[in-house]
Image (cartoon, coloured by chain):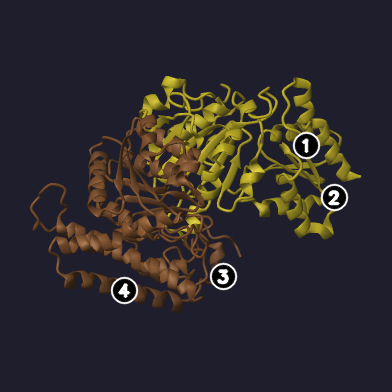
């Protein structure tokens, strides 16, 4: 890690900030590419856009080690990329190809890549939290020093699994970080209409859990919060709930009507957009425009290669239906 | 000559857990009240284990079935071998998501990158007065989910041998224990005794009818078979032991000899495992069957509380005998 920046106040080391920007850019441009290929009709799949949540994820994952665990949800492409899944494997999986991370058997809602720590992507709201408790329990039993991060939306905090997992993680002081990316909507319903508390962090008191709300469009604030939670977890001090305030700048599913979202909120989301904000911040921190442009061009190149690879790759052989159901192949 | 050593069903379970934990540090237990401080499990199946292996590995949990199974799934995908105790089978209904959407499917959905070597133990069974929410036999639900293995034992030695195999197996396995049988005694197995998953056992040979059964009814079917044998009816009996994956070869070979078959289980007859077994036999042996396959199961009702009603709900020896006879006419 570069130590060019003196440790002053809330400033995050500029090399770390650049790493967050690198991940943010990869997410942002991947999300854009998915949407453009869907619009063009090149791709046909149900896609849950992550526009507005890029920085929250990139900053959180940058505070982790590569071997730390991640559990995320069907709106998870930002988390998976930020944790380090190779874009080629991601794209081939999203397109259902044999070369995908999961041989095309999981698809967009079920991305797994243990090598980068992406352990489970669930399509069931809230179900990742108990699994994350188990990953953290395993780390505690093995003493392997890993930390587990589980990402979920504000909507997940209204399902029973949230309560059971928060309680269990707390009583067992497990090395798990619950990251609620509060994008203010559960499907089509705004937070205030579905949730009994104004802040998700208010719920942590019920579990005697440390909690912090951060501006998820602010890379430095989010990184600092994640860094502190990781330190607590690794020190055996137990779980943390982080509520990263983000925006869902598009509908629940790409292409779906989101006229139910107030214009003022969408304008605020554009104004607070974390991606250009982080770019401006880097320039403020004396990072050369050329270096930023280089990161952006590199992301575009990686994505172009991944898309080309995914589109030109073969589908899995139908006989794959008999493999990976059980450890032993099912007889033909 | 001394009597051969006997153990109870609960002791059989305990022996398997003990052997598995001694042999493999990745095996750990979690469930409600399972540590010795809480009594070693409501059915005493885990008695003494937390004293021996510590409360980290024999982990008493809150009453949180979703978190118990979810945590077990999470630990399993890192290579641990958790054994989760869900006190009663009906409580699986509050953690179905973790079992059906996660435990059973993660291997496939990850393209084999992760696996879930998880064992879930649960007790259940009618006849002991627990009423409608603590007695159901729901094995058919789980056998219907690709990726799940479903196992149940008919005697203490098999309970020990099957559970040990389930824990060592790389797939998620549901291990069903009948609460009416926890105290039942049977011959003690040798240390290390294992029963392979997926293999049914031919318990008794006979030339006239094959009865396919599993779990608690095995004893009753054997008694009926003996009684009918005295009348000159040759009944052969198969204990499936593993419900899923189904040992089709053993069943078909046996029925091919008798050309008559009856399926008996404690679960409600309608839409039960018996329908699947019957259908598989019909598909392969239709031309040579001498009678329609009969099924015996419990009645189409929630499990009642009142003792006469509960007995009326359960399958009976008379019904088993009548079903066997009906195939002979």
In the rendered image, is residue B240 in sight?
no
Q: Find residue A88 and report its horizontal and vertical position in percent.
A: 37, 70
Q: Are marks 2 and 1 on the same chain?
A: yes
**Numbered tag placed on residue A318 in the rendering:** 3
Give the colour in which the image draws chain B: yellow
Residue under the image location 76 percent in, 33 percent down = B301
Q: Nearest to the eye among marks 4 and 1: give it.
A: 4
Q: Would you say the residues marked 2 and 3 are in contact, meaning their CB atoms lie under 8 Å apart?
A: no
Residue under the image location 10 percent in, 50 percent down = A7
Q: Which chain is brown?
A: A
Q: Chain of mark 2?
A: B
Instruction: Count residues near mark 4 (Cα–Cα under 10 Å), then give few for <14, some for 14-19, many for 20+.
Output: some
Which quadrant does the C terminus of chain A fall into? bottom right
Where is residue A49, by image quadrant?
bottom left
In terms of sequence position, does the residue under pointer 2 or pointer 1 come before the other? 2
Q: CA distance from mark 4 to mark 1?
A: 62 Å
Pointer 4 residue: A300
Instruction: Count residues near mark 1 (Cα–Cα under 10 Å), then give few for <14, some for 14-19, many for 20+.
Output: few
Pointer 1 residue: B300
Q: Are marks 2 and 4 on the same chain?
A: no
- Which of the pair A10/B35 is nearer the observer? A10
Q: CA distance from mark 4 to mark 3?
A: 33 Å
**Which structural element holds mark 3?**
helix
Q: Would you say the residues marked 4 and 1 are in contact, meaning their CB atoms lie under 8 Å apart?
A: no
């Amino acid at each position: 890690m570069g130590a060019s920046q003196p440790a002053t106040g809330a400033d995050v080391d500029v090399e770390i900030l650049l790493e967050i920007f690198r991940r943010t850019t990869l997410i942002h441009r991947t999300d854009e590419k998915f949407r453009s290929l869907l619009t063009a009709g090149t791709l046909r799949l149900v896609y849950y856009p992550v526009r507005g949540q890029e920085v929250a994820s990139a900053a959180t994952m940058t505070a982790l080690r590569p071997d730390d665990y991640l559990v995320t949800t069907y709106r998870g492409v930002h988390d998976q990329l930020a944790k380090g899944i190779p874009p080629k494997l991601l794209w081939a999986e999203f397109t259902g190809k044999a070369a995908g991370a999961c041989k095309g058997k999981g698809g967009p809602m079920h991305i797994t890549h243990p090598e980068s720590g992406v352990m489970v992507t669930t399509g069931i709201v809230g179900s990742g939290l108990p699994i994350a408790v188990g990953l953290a329990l395993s780390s505690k039993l093995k003493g392997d020093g890993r930390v587990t991060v589980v990402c979920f939306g504000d909507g997940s905090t209204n399902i029973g699994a949230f309560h059971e997992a928060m309680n269990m993680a707390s009583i067992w002081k497990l090395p798990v970080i619950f990251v609620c990316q509060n994008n203010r909507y559960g499907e089509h319903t705004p937070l205030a209409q579905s949730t009994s508390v104004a802040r998700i962090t208010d719920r942590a008191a019920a579990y005697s859990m440390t909690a912090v709300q951060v501006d998820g469009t602010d890379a430095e604030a989010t990184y600092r919060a994640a860094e502190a939670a990781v330190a607590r977890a690794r020190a055996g001090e137990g779980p943390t709930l982080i509520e990263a305030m983000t925006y869902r700048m598009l509908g629940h599913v790409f292409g779906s009507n989101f006229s139910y979202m107030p214009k003022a909120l969408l304008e605020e989301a554009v104004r607070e957009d974390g991606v250009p904000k982080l770019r401006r911040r880097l320039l403020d921190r004396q990072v050369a425009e050329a270096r930023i442009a280089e990161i952006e061009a590199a992301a575009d190149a990686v994505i172009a290669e991944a898309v080309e690879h995914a589109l030109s790759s073969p589908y899995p052989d139908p006989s794959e239906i008999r493999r990976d159901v059980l450890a032993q192949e099912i007889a033909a | 000559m001394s009597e051969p050593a006997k153990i109870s069903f609960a002791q059989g379970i305990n022996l398997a857990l003990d052997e598995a934990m001694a042999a493999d540090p990745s095996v750990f237990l979690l469930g409600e009240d399972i540590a010795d401080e809480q009594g070693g499990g409501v059915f005493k199946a885990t008695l003494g284990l937390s004293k021996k292996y510590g409360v980290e590995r024999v982990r008493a949990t809150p009453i949180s079935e979703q978190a118990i199974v979810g945590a077990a799934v999470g630990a399993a995908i890192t290579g641990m071998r958790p054994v989760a105790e869900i006190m009663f089978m009906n409580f699986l209904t509050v953690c179905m998501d973790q079992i059906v959407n996660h435990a059973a499917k993660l291997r496939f959905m990850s393209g084999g990158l992760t696996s879930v070597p998880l064992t879930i133990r649960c007790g259940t069974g009618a006849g002991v007065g627990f009423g409608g929410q603590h007695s159901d036999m729901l094995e058919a639900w789980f056998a219907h989910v690709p990726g799940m293995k479903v196992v149940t034992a008919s005697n203490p030695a098999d309970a020990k041998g099957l559970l040990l195999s389930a824990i060592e197996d790389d797939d998620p396995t549901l291990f069903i224990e009948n609460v009416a049988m926890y105290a039942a005694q049977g011959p003690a197995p040798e240390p290390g005794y294992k029963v392979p998953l997926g293999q049914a056992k031919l318990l008794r040979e006979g030339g006239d009818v094959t009865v396919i059964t599993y779990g608690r009814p095995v004893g009753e079917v054997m008694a009926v078979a003996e009684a009918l044998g005295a009348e000159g009816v040759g009944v052969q009996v198969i204990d499936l032991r593993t419900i899923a994956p189904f040992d089709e070869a053993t069943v078909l070979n046996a029925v091919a000899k008798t050309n008559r078959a009856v399926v008996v289980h404690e679960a409600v007859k309608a839409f039960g495992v018996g329908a699947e077994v019957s259908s598989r036999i019909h598909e392969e042996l239709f031309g040579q069957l001498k009678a329609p396959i009969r099924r015996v199961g419990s009645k189409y009702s929630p499990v009642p509380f009142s003792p006469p009603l509960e007995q009326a709900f359960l399958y009976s020896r008379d019904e088993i005998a009548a079903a066997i006879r009906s195939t002979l006419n």
